[in-house]
Amino acid sequence: MPPSPGISRRSLIAGGAGLGLAVALGPPGQAAQASPAARRAAPLRDVFRLGVASGEPDAEGVVLWTRLAMDPIAPDGLGGMPARPVPVQWQFARDENFKKVVRHGVETARPEEAHSVHVELDGLDPGAEYFYRFKVESELSQAGRTLTAPAPGARKRDLHLSFASCADYQKGWFTPYRRMAEDHPDLIAFLGDYIYEYGDYKYPVRDQAGGECFDLAGYRLRYAQHKADPDLQMAHAIAPWTVVFDDHDIENGWAGDVPEQPDPPFLPRRAAAFQAFWENMPLRRAQKPTGPAMSLYHTLRWGAVANMHMLDTRQYRDLYACTGRSGTVGDDCADRFDTGRTILGDEQEAWLGERLRTSEAVWDLLGQQVFFMQMDWANGAAHGYSNEGWDGYVASRNRVTAAIADNRRNGVVLTGDVHSHWAGEVKRDHADPGSPSVAVELVSTSVTSEGDGRDEYDNTQILLAENPHVKFFNGRRGYVRTVVSEREMKVDFRSLGYVSEPYAPAYTSGSFVIEPGTPTLNPA
């Protein structure tokens, strides 16, 4: 049974899956209040309060992650840790009791990286389940479960994939993460807005907006607030993740090198946000940022069943069509159709085209941040298109859909950002009423953003009628659960009735099946 909803967030203990996933979020330790000399000399206690994670699996390896913090809400963002390197032991085992340890070692957690640890393993068995944990002095972390991808060419190992986006800390409880963990997926994809750059630093208050992250200390603190959450820790400890950022991980509505607000200077702010993002995610060394630049897009391969292309639609995009700011534009916005405009940037777009051309997987999944298929958000005869999504970059979208169609790929676009569940069919050219469907788009709702939500809104049926290629909507919080096999892709939209209180049950608000060679949504 879950803990009583009346239990304080600070005293909540997360348990799950027989993995010993226990983290008591009690009052911050006294080490943060001690003198610098005392902090250097004192034994380290309760250092694993931000949990453990793994990520970016391939057929031979995976990344293990933790970040040490004795006081997650220390105002300097450094978790109450001493200003010195700390050796961190790690174990990697075949069993959750660690009787069959296959790898072990020591990594150094350094203050200049917020005492984060990234252990990048290779030479592992493909398609295998492993368990891992960390130790600092006498402190032992909770255990985590992870998997390697099946061997290249393997077609019989299904991919149990869940994905989500948009976790606004002050808007609700992170119960969707708990429900996702209870499904025991093979892989979790997070599609942007893992944090929100605005909000209140006063943990665990959730109902106030206020302080905004501008510098490295602020972003580090915001991540620590999130990662101290027991439900999020469960989701990280149950399966490996693959992640991309969106706007709120840095600043609302940014596009390329152009911020929404001119102050403070944007590139130093983005460099700080990227550094904190890398410190707090189970990413590979190749993904470590250099100042305000971060090479994040990549392909994760699951045998011959699926290639998952994780895209970056923020860092390389052209400025928003017509207005220069994110918003809704009408038919008079000719900039949307400019053939020179791109949301991916020329290099990433060419890279994706080549990956689709050479793919031999049954499915090609595009993990990305913003609405891909055309969507008219205006009711009635007038048209209104979001210039922040792919509707603001029509030629760029047409080039991607052409690559899917011309290479006969089974394309499924996985999307976050819009804080509600949607599903629909992507046309090769949405401007042509007779254009065939070439892919399917699955849009996950938010974890908490915009609060509890509703099943439908007053204009939901009007929007669906005016966008006949869109087949499904649900406005609650939650995530998407899929099973991807060589035969079909099963999709469950998982919803929660509320996040304003913890421990809401999850239910399936819509189910679909997609079959190879037929880019349509079939109700299950």
Image (cartoon, rainbow, N blue to C red):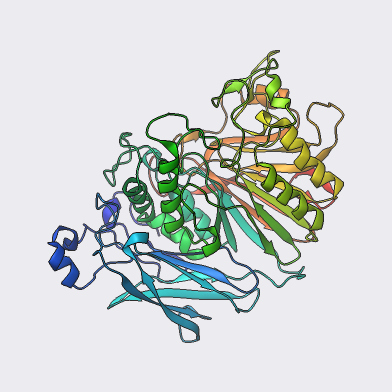
Query: Who is closer to the viewer here, 452 or 35?
Result: 35
Q: How many marks?
A: 0
Residue pictured at 84% horizontal, 47% vertical: 518
Q: Split into 4 quadrants, where in the image is the N terminus?
A: bottom left
Q: Residue furthest bottom?
A: 99
Query: Who is closer to the viewer here, 438 or 84?
Result: 84
Residue pictured at 36% horizontal, 68% vertical: 109
**Could you say where residue 83 lies in the image, as x and y percent from the top left?**
25, 64
Q: Is residue 114 left or right of residue 19?
A: left
The reply to whether residue 259 is visible in this rendering is: yes
**Could you say where residue 70 lies in the image, as x and y percent from the top left?**
26, 62
**Could you say where residue 229 lies in the image, as x and y percent from the top left?**
37, 54
The reply to whether residue 239 is visible in this rendering is: no
Q: Quadrant of residue 168?
A: top left
Q: Quadrant of residue 378?
A: top right
Q: Using the image, determine if residue 7 lies above or below residue 100.
A: above
Q: Is residue 214 left or right of residue 309?
A: left
Q: Is residue 375 left or right of residue 458?
A: right
Q: Residue furthest top?
A: 381
**Could you say where residue 156 lies in the image, as x and y percent from the top left?**
75, 69
Q: Using the image, determine if residue 499 lies above or below residue 35.
A: above
